[in-house]
Amino acid sequence: MTFKTGHQTGRIGIMAAMPEELQALLDVMPDESVERVAGREFWVGHLHGREVVAVLSRIGKVAAATTTTMLLSHYGVDQIIFTGVAGGLGDGVRVGDVVVADALVQHDMDASPLFPRFELPGLGVSTLSPPAAFTTMVRDTVAQVLSPAALASGGALADVHLASLNLGLPQVHQGLIISGDQFINAAQTCRELTQALPAALAVEMEGAAVAQVCHDFGVPYAVIRTISDRADDDAHIDFPRFIHAVARHYSLAIVEALLQRG
Ligand code: ADE
């Protein structure tokens, strides 16, 4: 796949998975105005001198694919940054950590026996990856934003109180994120997923769909997920509290740093 180059100066699409994340971003966009298209609200404006179109992804693969298609074909963005939360699957991927995808798989894609399990019919692959250099830049930026020094200095993350939430310092992971139209909240399902896809670090419901659309359009993208739960039997309990206390702050700090980085 050849990705377009020269994306540094163009419009950036920001997809937020949760309303709280989108609101945190809109609160710091000085000139945003809303346009309603395809049943969605697209917020067009500037942040840190960059042209931005921000939108709620909506939940699930089809909804996220439609939102992505609108950003690319209607708004002509030339890169997409997706932020949200995910369930941790990989060993050592803990609540409060952040995973940057360098590969994405739709874990519920199964057209066997016509095609191997997970393979995307027509594409001949099961895994899609954003451009490696783009992923490295994003991973390095996230690591800088969430470094112990940056966290200790307060700044954009002054409202995150890790100790009172029983969380350690966030680790930044890079690797496989898997997506499917299912909120995973059972240890047995986690075991089945990791057996089938041992490299999976995190599971969510949109990233691999965003990847497929961006792949078709040849546009670079990043999927960045803060781990809100371990996708186990407690997943539904941890989720809303975590988004409010941690994820929306991480998401905003990361997006702002990426915009400033160019
Ligand atoms: N997003 C956040 N946690 C998730 C989970 N456990 N399963 C799917 N999507 C998620």
Image: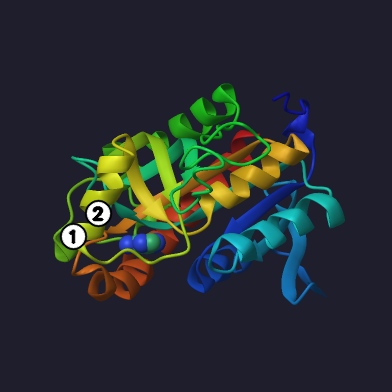
Residue drawn at (25%, 70%), measured in percent from left and top?
238
Q: For mark 1, what is the residue?
A: 187
The C terminus: image quadrant:
top right
Q: Quadrant of residue 65?
A: bottom right
Marks 1 and 2, Cα distance to the nearest angstrom?
5 Å
Between 55 and 165, which is closer to the camera in this rendering? 55
Q: How is the image coloured?
A: rainbow
Residue that numbered label 2 is attached to: 190
Identify the image quadrant of the N terminus: top right
Quick check: 208 left or right of 183? right
Residue 66 point in image, percent of width and height: 71, 61
Q: Quadrant of residue 190 in the image? A: bottom left
Identify the amino acid type marked 2: Cys
Figure disc tally: 2
Q: Is residue 178 visible?
A: yes
> Foreground residue, 42 or 64?
64
| Residue toward you, 179 or 163 | 179
**Mark 1, secondary structure of its residue:** helix
Q: Residue furthest front?
A: 113
Q: Indicate whether 93 appears above or below 87.
A: above
- Identify the amino acid type marked 1: Ala
Residue 165, numbered label? none
Q: Do the CB atoms of the residues marked 1 and 2 lie less than 8 Å apart?
A: yes
Which residue is painted at 75% across and 32% down in the image? 7
Residue 26 location, x and y as percent?
63, 67
